[in-house]
Amino acid sequence: MTATFQACTPKLQKGSVKKLFKQSAIVNDHFTGFALYDLDKQQMIYELNSDKYFTPASNTKLYTFYTCLRMLGDSIPGLQYVNRGDSLIFWGTGDPSFLQTDLKAVKAYNLLKNTTQNIYYSYGRYTGTFYGDGWPYGDYNDYYQAEITELPVEDNVAIVYADAAGELQVKPGFLKRYLRRDDTYKPGSFFVQRDILSNSFVYPNMPVPKKYRQEIPWKTSVQLTLELLQDTLHKTVGLVSLPIPGDAKTIYNAPADSVYKRMLQPSDNFIAEQLLLVCASTRFKTLSTDSVISYSVKHYLSDLPDKPQWADGSGLSRKDLFTPRDMVALLNKILAEVKDEKKLHGMMPIGGVAGTIRSAYKTDNGVPFVWAKTGTLANNHNQSGYLVTRKGKRLAFSFMNNNFTRPTREIRDEMVRIMTYLHDNY
């Protein structure tokens, strides 16, 4: 089902959608784009700057989601491997679910754990850098910017926490050797800082707060991946660098729907980035984000109204640029691919119920009416998704706000006010 973009119809504008925007002081003091689309009539209802490009932030994950729907099956490829004599040689697929904190997928892990063969990790399949194109290097210590690797382990993020005795611990425990107190490090409050180029984690000489918890991406390397594997498998893992052969088998790890839900509802950047590598593993011998994006734009997205400028899987990059009418067309394509609207809604953030819009919206007497992906960077906040009105009208929308100087909360609240009005009155 491809969206057709016809002239605006006034039938859903009783009260008038246009008036809502004209009378809003908040949406008129910055660059605002909006597209509202009737899913049943396949008609655009209202547009404001819908053909202009906006920084989408995590709305980019909808592009990643759609690409995965087209390229992956019902399970995520976990590892590819071959048996050669007494050896099992395996290659990473970029699978983010491998021992991931919430998904806890273990099929690929159990393959390695239970085999009686000698096991060898063949590295070098990922052709990119540890950060996506256009990512801010200054955020390297923040939980949302885990590095990209062909074989991630446990989210590529260390969890530093206070134990019952008030001592500082780290998970995975292997990294404890890199955690040390530094008497010269004096932040305003207790905070653990990693060195930008290494896995040196330092903390100040002050009491550890009760229930302290901090997530910090570690500095990835082939050697660290190997050491973490050996530590968790409790067996030796050899290291080789071989081209993946044509007879390589694939073991599938987590159910795809659970991975997509985990990417979309809390807006997990790590999963989004790694999923593009998983897509690459199904079509290319190398794991390349650029190759997958180019392939998707050419083969799956060529019918969008405007050519997307797409740089990464998560939306961390400022180089991503999409138009609101593209977002609405994409939402149409996603719905056509999933087919089951209830299933799709269950994977999206749900207003008043789950994910990044849980606290933004209220339900209508316990019934949610909006399912939308948010996207936030400094001075940018967007929502794109689906809305069902009290009269049962099924709508797709993209509401994009760029270059504002107000607090993000004010932008979000005005978006919620307008979308709730549409729900209540149409």
Image (spheres, grey):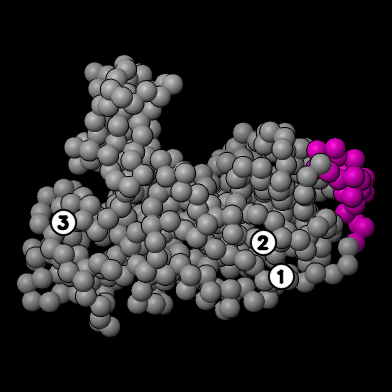
* Circles 1 and 3 in contact, beta carbons < 8 Å: no
Mark 2 is surrounded, within 10 Å at the Cα level, by few (under 14), some (14 to 19) or many (20 or more) other residues, namely: many
Residue 362 shown left or right of residue 273 in the figure:
right
Residue annotated with mark 3: 113
Residue 242 pos. (x, y %): 21, 75
* Circles 1 and 2 in contact, beta carbons < 8 Å: yes
Label 3 sits on what residue type? Lys
Query: Is residue 277 visible to the viewer in this orientation of the structure?
Result: yes
Residue 185 pos. (x, y %): 34, 26
| Secondary structure of residue under mark 3 | helix
Residue annotated with mark 1: 306
The vertical placement of 171 against 62, above or below, is above
Answer whether residue 26 is magenta in the image: yes
Residues at marks 1 and 2, CA–CA distance in whole angstroms: 8 Å
Residue annotated with mark 2: 322
Q: Earlier in the sequence, mark 1 or mark 2?
A: 1
Decide which of 50, 200 is in the foreground and name it: 200
Decide which of 53, 272 is in the foreground and name it: 53
